[in-house]
Image (cartoon, rainbow, N blue to C red):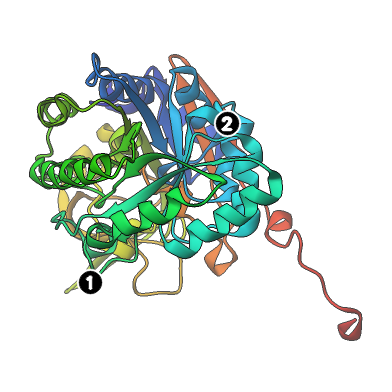
Amino acid sequence: MHHFTYKNNVLHCESVPLPIIAEAVDTPFYLYSSATLSHHFETFDSSFAGLPHLTCFAVKACSNLAVLRLFARLGGGADIVSGGELFRCLKAGVDPRRIIYSGVGKTREELRYGLLSGILLFNVESVQELELLQEVAATLEVKAPVSLRVNPDVDPRTHAYISTGLAKNKFGVPISEAAAVYRQARTMPNLKIMGVSCHIGSQLTEVSPFLESLRKLKDFMKQLAKAGIAIRYLDLGGGLGVRYQDETPPHPREYAEALKQELAGLDCTLILEPGRVIVCNAAVLVSRVLYTKRGRSKNFVIVDAAMNDLARPSLYDAFHDILPVDQGAVAARGRETADVVGPICESGDFLAKGRDLPVFESGDMLAVMSSGAYGFSMSSNYNSRPRVAEVLVQGEEFFVIRDRETYDTLIQGENIPDFLR
């Protein structure tokens, strides 16, 4: 569920009409509902009630400080994949003892930053990373808490670009080799083995791949126990999908109940890394129509948002529903099949293709729904376009939680050398 609804034919976020926000901040902008964010987090987290667990929001999905702060206040932790994400989490007030650090390419400086910050776990993804972490921890005279990311070779049945648990993917250590790596880690004096980690992909719409992975991990943990390696944390990653179009993903409670049955008897704390399922439907991208081009074979609605603002349609051919902000204004015009495209100089710059839409005209506003996950966090300055504002609604109020970039910020940090002056 979400808190974007029509009232008197005008789209509202909670109690605020979208045109009021557009008048204040201009378009395009990302708009988040705090009520939806809170509801989704609490629904997910409470689904695992009765089981020792930690819900670590996947920061890569949406990294705004205000959003991270909201989840931290609800008791959430964070799943990070870079030093920049760690910096954001600490600035937002996330307890470092609730932060886990994943990712295949952690640098020496990032490992050091994580150790000095006192994070809960490093999800190590290779033998070389393990060796570097030992070296950095020894230099700091501390013990690094480690969990090995195990690749179970399970097909998540999702888009190839967001599949992470197959043998051909770059992530983790193959489950067939992982026990040897744990034995190696046990010999390293500045490492402390704490857990086992796994993440098989994103936007999963079935429970069965999760259960297949969990069963493989349970067998693997039995091997470790026989070798005298105790595991305190089992990190099952994230990946639970959402409805964009006609998907039928399981509700978090259904997902949790299935996992609980398989977890019965395991004496460890469960770590979960939800991202998309929490933030996706909690935000929209609001855009204004600049021009329309109608022809015999194709109709185009040209808007002020583009692929640099929302990359998912161009990157994954992803579907996002398109709704008029003022339903009454377009009601009498009928409908048409059109592409919604942006100003970027790429044929791949589209937000929707071949879509049955209301007939939009210049000046109309539209909302690109389900844009909270991997929306702003994947945006760029391609074509030297300033990144858009982010706005958070709380009841009857709205707050700019990220200022719109300016032309001056586009060139911040750039310099012309003396020989070109």
- Secondary structure of the residue carrying tag 1 is loop
Which residue is labeled 1 in the image?
Answer: 295
Q: How many marks?
A: 2
Between circles 2 and 1, the one closer to the viewer is: 2
Within 10 Å of the Cα at label 2, are there few (<14), some (14-19), or many (20+) other Cα atoms?
some
User: Which residue occupies the foreground of this view, 6 or 255?
Assistant: 255
Q: Height in image: 170 above or below 134?
A: below
- Secondary structure of the residue carrying tag 2 is strand
User: Which residue occupies the foreground of this view, 9 or 187?
Assistant: 187
Q: Residue 380 in the image: x percent, y percent?
A: 52, 59
Q: CA distance from mark 2 to mark 1?
A: 39 Å
Q: What's the residue type where badge 1 is placed? A: Gly
Q: What's the residue type where badge 2 is placed? A: Val
Q: Is residue 236 left or right of residue 18?
A: left
Q: Quadrant of residue 114?
A: top right
Q: Is residue 245 left or right of residue 80?
A: left
Q: Residue 96 in the image: x percent, y percent?
A: 56, 31
User: Which residue occupies the foreground of this view, 403 or 59?
Assistant: 59
Q: Height in image: 332 above or below 37?
A: below
Q: Residue 129 in the image: x percent, y percent?
A: 50, 60
Residue at horizontal 91%, vertical 80%? 418
Q: Quadrant of residue 177?
A: bottom left
Taking the image as drawn, is residue 320 in sight?
Answer: yes
Which residue is labeled 2 in the image?
Answer: 400
Is the C terminus in the top left, top right, bottom left or bottom right quadrant?
bottom right
